[in-house]
Image (cartoon, rainbow, N blue to C red):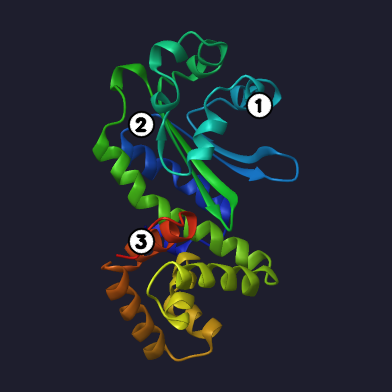
Amino acid sequence: MRLLAEATDPDTLRGDLALPMLDLLRADTYVSMTWDKAARRFDRAKALNMSLENLRSWDEYYRFVDPLTFPMMERRHPTLATQILCQSDLARTEFFNDFLARDHMHWGVNVYVFAHGECTGDMRIWRRRERGNFDNNEIEALRLVEPAFAAALARFQWEADPLLSPQARESVTELLQRRSALSQREAEAAALVLSGCPDKLIAKRMAVGLPTVRFHLANAFRKLRVENRTQLAARAQALVNDPFVASN
């Protein structure tokens, strides 16, 4: 969480998360990429314990026969490889035998994060066969990291393109206000939390003082029944992504 809060560069952040995430999930291999919507391909890979040759082979060939990545991306939350294909079926594929097995990647979980409908990055975490599949507690741990990871990458996107910020903020604010009991200013503050902004930056963007920001956030906590900024970001993300999520 400290890395996510203090990061100043998205590619460095994705690389720095490798060891903490492998430790957190007792895993062996970490890969993180960003999605290039225009080219419709993943790039800017960061990896730990995966050969560069194998990583290049995915982009050059195996992405075309990969039965996991795009279905996992569509789910928009941490997804086990075995939720897409049972292990016995996966083990019979070219993708498993000629690609995953090279780096002893047997059990996998991927998470893809989005901002304003666009994928901003991912984490692909794999284990050796002998470790066994990821359990529910480990998936819940990844779910706790997910909204903060999404917010950090969204913040970099806004900072890289200042023209995007007002429009994006307005869109998310409108969705939050429409799908919850938040006032317009409370929804705006929650949208900025979702983007990863600290209180001082929220105050600057809303042109108000810090006490006013904290007043709006306290109201948002109460109305959305959350206890902290991480929970607020997760709740706001759920409201933005799913129109059927009720505020109560």
Q: What is the distance, in whole Å, between disc 3 and disc 2 at their CAs? A: 35 Å
Q: Are marks 1 and 2 in contact (CB under 8 Å)?
A: no
The mark lying in front, picked from 3 and 2, is 3
- Left or right placement of residue 31 versus residue 109 in this view: right
Q: Amino acid at mark 2?
A: Ala
Tell me the number on the disc at residue 27: 2
Circle 3: is it few (<14), some (14-19), or many (20+) Cα within 10 Å?
A: few
- Compared with 30, 140 (above or below) is below
Looking at the picture, how far across and down is residue 53, in whole percent? 63, 23
Residue 56 is marked as 1
Q: Secondary structure at mark 3?
A: loop
Label 3, on which residue? 246
Q: Quadrant of residue 154?
A: bottom right
Question: For the residues marked 1 and 2, what is the alpha-carbon distance in whole angstroms?
Answer: 22 Å
- Please name the residue shown 46% across and 15% down the image: 90
First reached walking from the N terminus: tag 3 or tag 2:
2
- Residue 197 appears in the picture as rendered: no
Q: Mark 1 belongs to which amino acid?
A: Arg
Q: Amino acid at mark 3?
A: Ala
Q: Nearer the viewer, residue 177 or 66?
A: 177
Question: Residue at 43% of width from left, 43% of height from top?
Answer: 77
Residue drawn at the location 40% of the way across and 76% of the way down: 182
